[in-house]
Amino acid sequence: MDRDRLETLLNEVKNGERTVEEAVASLSQLPYCDLGFARVDSHRQLRTGFAEVIFAQGKTIEQTSAIFAHLSCLHEKVLVTRISPEAAEVLVERFPGVRHHPLSRLVTFGYQEPVGETRIAILCAGTADLGVAEEAAITAEMRGIKVARVYDVGVAGIHRIFNELEMLQKMEVLVVVAGMEGALASVVAGLVSRPIVAVPTSVGYGASFGGLAPLLAMLNSCAAGITVVNIDNGFGAGTFASMVVENKGKK
Amino acid sequence: MDRDRLETLLNEVKNGERTVEEAVASLSQLPYCDLGFARVDSHRQLRTGFAEVIFAQGKTIEQTSAIFAHLSCLHEKVLVTRISPEAAEVLVERFPGVRHHPLSRLVTFGYQEPVGETRIAILCAGTADLGVAEEAAITAEMRGIKVARVYDVGVAGIHRIFNELEMLQKMEVLVVVAGMEGALASVVAGLVSRPIVAVPTSVGYGASFGGLAPLLAMLNSCAAGITVVNIDNGFGAGTFASMVVENKGKK
Amino acid sequence: MDRDRLETLLNEVKNGERTVEEAVASLSQLPYCDLGFARVDSHRQLRTGFAEVIFAQGKTIEQTSAIFAHLSCLHEKVLVTRISPEAAEVLVERFPGVRHHPLSRLVTFGYQEPVGETRIAILCAGTADLGVAEEAAITAEMRGIKVARVYDVGVAGIHRIFNELEMLQKMEVLVVVAGMEGALASVVAGLVSRPIVAVPTSVGYGASFGGLAPLLAMLNSCAAGITVVNIDNGFGAGTFASMVVENKGKK
Amino acid sequence: MDRDRLETLLNEVKNGERTVEEAVASLSQLPYCDLGFARVDSHRQLRTGFAEVIFAQGKTIEQTSAIFAHLSCLHEKVLVTRISPEAAEVLVERFPGVRHHPLSRLVTFGYQEPVGETRIAILCAGTADLGVAEEAAITAEMRGIKVARVYDVGVAGIHRIFNELEMLQKMEVLVVVAGMEGALASVVAGLVSRPIVAVPTSVGYGASFGGLAPLLAMLNSCAAGITVVNIDNGFGAGTFASMVVENKGKK
Amino acid sequence: MDRDRLETLLNEVKNGERTVEEAVASLSQLPYCDLGFARVDSHRQLRTGFAEVIFAQGKTIEQTSAIFAHLSCLHEKVLVTRISPEAAEVLVERFPGVRHHPLSRLVTFGYQEPVGETRIAILCAGTADLGVAEEAAITAEMRGIKVARVYDVGVAGIHRIFNELEMLQKMEVLVVVAGMEGALASVVAGLVSRPIVAVPTSVGYGASFGGLAPLLAMLNSCAAGITVVNIDNGFGAGTFASMVVENKGKK
Amino acid sequence: MDRDRLETLLNEVKNGERTVEEAVASLSQLPYCDLGFARVDSHRQLRTGFAEVIFAQGKTIEQTSAIFAHLSCLHEKVLVTRISPEAAEVLVERFPGVRHHPLSRLVTFGYQEPVGETRIAILCAGTADLGVAEEAAITAEMRGIKVARVYDVGVAGIHRIFNELEMLQKMEVLVVVAGMEGALASVVAGLVSRPIVAVPTSVGYGASFGGLAPLLAMLNSCAAGITVVNIDNGFGAGTFASMVVENKGKK
Amino acid sequence: MDRDRLETLLNEVKNGERTVEEAVASLSQLPYCDLGFARVDSHRQLRTGFAEVIFAQGKTIEQTSAIFAHLSCLHEKVLVTRISPEAAEVLVERFPGVRHHPLSRLVTFGYQEPVGETRIAILCAGTADLGVAEEAAITAEMRGIKVARVYDVGVAGIHRIFNELEMLQKMEVLVVVAGMEGALASVVAGLVSRPIVAVPTSVGYGASFGGLAPLLAMLNSCAAGITVVNIDNGFGAGTFASMVVENKGKK
Amino acid sequence: MDRDRLETLLNEVKNGERTVEEAVASLSQLPYCDLGFARVDSHRQLRTGFAEVIFAQGKTIEQTSAIFAHLSCLHEKVLVTRISPEAAEVLVERFPGVRHHPLSRLVTFGYQEPVGETRIAILCAGTADLGVAEEAAITAEMRGIKVARVYDVGVAGIHRIFNELEMLQKMEVLVVVAGMEGALASVVAGLVSRPIVAVPTSVGYGASFGGLAPLLAMLNSCAAGITVVNIDNGFGAGTFASMVVENKGKK
């Protein structure tokens, strides 16, 4: 709904450069492509600063593949999240330039190691949280942002994080991934004055209730400067952190 | 159901020193006193090592007072928990030697400052957790155990706890009281090799859900050596910690 | 634990400019002030970029006042959150330069209307969400950041937000405050490519379960670029959004 | 318990056209057929305007098949919901005229494409919600009602729905199927003045808690004109929407 | 976003009857009125078929009164829901033609007893559910629809409903209000072939959990043809039922 | 729907002793009395073996009083449950023979101390559970059944119950009332071979979650022979236990 | 702890017919047999009126088989609940006289069709609830009690139950098994004046939450005379109902 | 952060025995070893009194094996918890001296039967709880502490525990493992005056909700002296109990 484009269009109508019918059509034009079972949003890159991401969970392999085919023609970079090994294999076979990251359950098209300054640090509490942390890391890297990985620094051995404080303080945003009781987010927020995006994970058992325990802990953190995403949502954290960093670059 | 006493009794019956009727009566004898609305458990001190404690919540003032009257005749020390200010005032007026501790909602009879070595440390995360921490502290003191109070050392300013580490390491048990996300228990367990009794509190709001958040966090702690009591149950933590310490003294 | 300061200190010890005892003391020095019931964290401004904030809920008026007195001597700006009208009245009476904001339950010391460019927009869905939105807004203003208020733009009348899109697109971060079903966050994220901090509120009834409904909705948003804070936590959202903006200024 | 039929029966008794025994038998007559493990309700079509539907979940294949055999003799149309692929295969083999719809987990007998005016629109938010949406669509079609399918119009790309508004406004009822945060129902209700039946789906992960998040969101919608059915209950939504439309036709 | 109006506007621009600036202004015109704390939606009657309703809960008396003043000038009928007795008294005093309905917590402006055929029946299970049932009834009456009230027909005395079946079968929609276990909705759906809007209420105690028990029961009804609104949401049920009936009248 | 009465009626019609119109009227006759806001169920005593009980919670004092007036004319015994002190006072003033039992929140009309053999024992765990236990006891006594009260026998002092075992074994049903962890029901079931109706109470705090803890414990009891009623539902337990006992008397 | 036996024993000691050592041994004698991993309770039949039942879930096949071997020597009847098909096959092979009931997941030893009067009726709402209903039925039959099975009478076709009312009214106890919304229990309680044991089942999906919906509905029933057992606990309901019936026979 | 070591280091710097660079390096030295995906905490034995334990759940077999290889070089004893049979087989094959305990899902390296006095008793309620109980037992034995196993003593046959009371009273700590309603912990605490660590298990079904029922029961125990660990957390209970016992030995 771009005001400038609207003014131009109206001027063209006024000047007879465009018929009323054309203008109506133009204003109604679909900014997406209908594949029958999916409406591929081809303008989202313009609108939100990044190509559409395919959330593969709950889609059949053929649906995922069809959407991927469409998007990989339109864009230089495509990201597929929560993909099964079977679906990933199909994409890798069918499309050149595709890469499967099994730990993070991602498929990437057009992935390149970012260069330049490291701007986001991604911490995780335990080895079992690695998949979610990697999902966040690669999501940011797909947007061209270099990240530092600081893994397995849970509070049971809190001294492991002290050596990293100086580096962390230089980052623009931190992503903290933790399951079980999720205390790492609060601890880091008490030590480093950077905005923190906390990702609770479903790592744990019993009264973890599938990640409810760290989710509630992170939402109730006594330290300010923490926001939270859905359980196991590494992609969401990576996207948000990237948007914060891109914001800065833009200005 | 003491085996020795049973043997003695049976020998007495055998030797005719005691009639069968007496023996039956003896074996059936009630180890409590029935006040109509309450059966005061006069043997509990022998059985569990401490006088009965009156849980005042849900009792009328007159019920509390009647049970208190009974127990304060039988024992040198009586503890009343979760008492309302109104009920406390009545007890203070009616019985000499009674003391009201409003912050911890306790009334004590026979309270004396313990002497000797400090054996339990009680930590709390924030000023609002003080009442629960004091409930734990005074409960232990009523059992004659000296405690160290380490208050307002929440993880938002985690450095506040570092100066206390040496002292904490010398304790036999730690009680850690925290609301909000309850991370303090995990942090302390990662720094000090002492058994920790964690007390979640209802301090917080929103997704704290009345203390559910720190309760789940503490139960899911990634650090070993932590056990948990009910939300706001300072009395339970103080009792358990004391029993651990007394165990040791006894051997 | 600043590396440079550590090197300096060690050099001074090496050069005999400082005794070992002095160095030990220095390294152990408490970066907080112990008021008995609270350890006021006087270094937090250095550590986290802002003066300590007093969370008044669960503190007695005298505790709040004592901490306020201490902090208002050390700092130019102090913020008190979730304060009762009674406690606010006491602070306003005792300390000059204090201002009470009843709708947002804040007390401020040193509040000044920020100047310069507007960098954060704060949206709320309904009139009943205003208090939480104001808490976020004033928190940011206390850090010197100018905010735009876009209130009562809930999705029941979704067209109300369309006129604001151009302005919203120019912001660095958006804070979206909504109760009931919390759909506003997803809708805005679908229309504007800015990072969004979503604040669920307890506005609603029945199956809202005290804000659980919008909390879950926001965490599960199908739109990327959203993070979430605790129910009714306007302060947390304002702080996080400010840290993102300050990050940018600093670089 | 038809009053007219009761009067007729009583008159027949009065006139000696029917014995007392016959009348008692008549009044007691079972309006269902007992298969041993199931009482097939053969009058339901009269009573509720539609043949009995077989809910296959939790039934063995033989139980489903036996009930199906019975109903497909009595009625021209039979619908089986939540059927496993194995059970569907058996029905398709055994009974002519049976059709399996795998995406919606339905089996139909006597299905015909409806003709005439489109009266219900069924919207879904994402490709993964398609199965539930199809269950609603085919349920309505089995009752002879033509439906419009508007799929993959989730709020992450909210502009996708704008082009459909004119058509939606012409429908008599809308069915909105959405998982994750379920915001689509509120958004549509804010744009179109038609009654909306919202269907939360279990699509999502983490804090979706199996569809609890969209269920609560839809129940708490700030837009009026929305009612909700059980999670993933496309059949219920299709039935209710059809009853509303049939109501109208009847009058 | 009226297509006709858009074409007209564009034609006027083409013909020079309207300047480009005027057209831009026109397209941008706010369809609501900004009172500062609220954006009153003056077009909603056109858009959704009914004037804006004021949800008074969480609004101050002065906010409610200001919105009421604005709307009662623009419209012939205004409805205020969930109003406190204090706020209702203020409205009754300030504005002529206002009526307070204390049982249903409603205030109406322009209320008239509907005439014509009865089209909706509203059933409630117990005397304690009456307030919610009345909220539904008056909401429908405000839209000019006549309703039948069938109160206190809970399943504990299920025979009470049998005498009403003939009448119920003639209605276009039924609203069933019930607390405790909410079984009434299923029972009515098993007896009457009309679409049913079920309203769970918070009537009950213990494991009712504030209305969760009847909410879940109604969502899981084994009878088809039932949809559900939020706990205690009589207004929502009355609105939805009215929209269904109006739909029919319109066609 | 008495078969005998139906046969008689039909015979009368056949014999011309009754007109068809009379028979229709007879079959339709309302077995309740409509007070406007309540349909008083005057046949319930015949149908369920006991007069209607008034559940006063959620009813206004005038509603309660009107229903009471009606029932106390029809019946010799009336029971009002969950009545407020204010409403009880009104009933006591207006109607002779009414008695208020404040602890159990009951009002009785026609209460008499039962005579004969004791058939039900009612146990409660703590003094705070007394009100619920008394509600069960008086409910049974209103039906003429003698009960034994065994109060304050919680498992913290498990020996208190051993002396009662012989008596308990002679009862026909036991009602066990307990809050906190509700272990008393399991313990009694492990010691006595009588059917047990367990009543969880809301006595407790923190993770009791309003009685959820004992409710779940009782439902999951490892001992067979236990059934459970709603939290704090002494009336329900007393009624069920009485029905079991009356069953026996009848045969 | 039989008083008579105690007196006899003491008399024997007094008279020298028994040594003190023998008496001590006698009083200490274990009323169970220790198999290492299980203590088989050989006195339970005396204590609770029935042989021990083996709960097979969570036990290995060998553990189940060993306990079964032990009990089937001591007793004429043994019941195994929640047994897997694999374990059942092993028992059937190894022990003569064993019978597997796959629908109810039971294995019986010594099962005989009961004779005499029918005393318990077991109702279930749908075909999918059959397994749980059969578990209740066979449990009662193993205790020699004849039961009536009234299956598939859910409230969606409520008329199916009317023909059974006369028979149901003659039973001593009813067991009502229902999933989904669990309304059948309330409906039956409103029609029949017999005590009802309600069994919620996990039949359903979505917001049934594994049987939570019918569990809460049954606990909150507005009809008195209902008690509830755990979800899917047919065994518990059958046991309780049998104990009520046996009670009666005994007196 | 050992004060003594700090003083020594500073003295060495002062005396020139150590360069500033060396001291900086020393103070920064990582007390863990970075394997890439895990930071093995080689100092934890010093810090917490025991070697690192590997939590195998959520780790790949290769990750587990690599960490095990590292730790088994550094330490004499290594414990792996929650290991799958496949991973256990790999460890047993690759490393000599490794032992798999399938029931408790543990792998041990350096396990030896402890000698000396028995200091901890581990009780479990049923055969199905054995795995969790064994996890606790072997955890303690790995720390050299002798334990007594008292299995299958659930409250359904409460007399089974009476014979063990004398022995239990001699222990220093009790670990009580129970599923279903978890009453065993309260019962033992009412009989024995020892501190109790309660472990809820996920044994049960239906309203057990994966162990929530015994968890809440244990947290709400009316008996003092009980603390609780996470559901099925035998390792946590064994560790805590051992720390209490070691405490004592040390002093």
Image: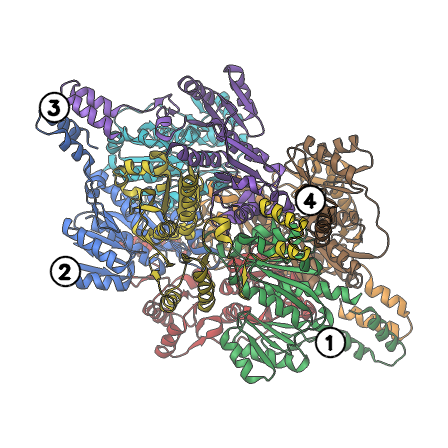
Chain colours: A cyan, B yellow, C blue, D orange, E red, F green, G brown, H purple
Chain under callout 3: C
Question: Do marks 2 and 3 share a chain?
Answer: yes
E187 and D79: which is toward the camera: E187
Alpha-carbon span between mark 3 and mark 4: 82 Å
Q: How many marks?
A: 4
Q: Which dot, 3 or 4, sits closer to the camera? A: 4
Label 4 amino acid? Ala
Chain under callout 1: F
Image x and y of residue F231, in percent: 56, 59
Alpha-carbon span between mark 4 and mark 1: 72 Å
Mark 2, residues whose alpha carbon is within 10 Å: few (<14), some, or many (≥20)? few
Side of G217 where A193 appears, left or right: left
B184 and C186: which is toward the camera: B184
Alpha-carbon span between mark 2 and mark 1: 78 Å
Alpha-carbon span between mark 1 and mark 3: 106 Å
Q: Which residue is mark 2?
A: C96
Q: Which residue is mark 4?
A: G23
Alpha-carbon span between mark 2 and mark 3: 49 Å
Q: Which dot, 2 or 3, sits closer to the camera? A: 3
Q: Which residue is mark 3?
A: C14
Label 3 amino acid? Lys
Q: Which dot, 1 or 3, sits closer to the camera? A: 3
What kind of element bears circle 3? helix
Looking at the image, is A84 positioned above or below residue F65? above
Q: Which dot, 4 or 1, sits closer to the camera? A: 4
Q: Which residue is mark 1?
A: F29
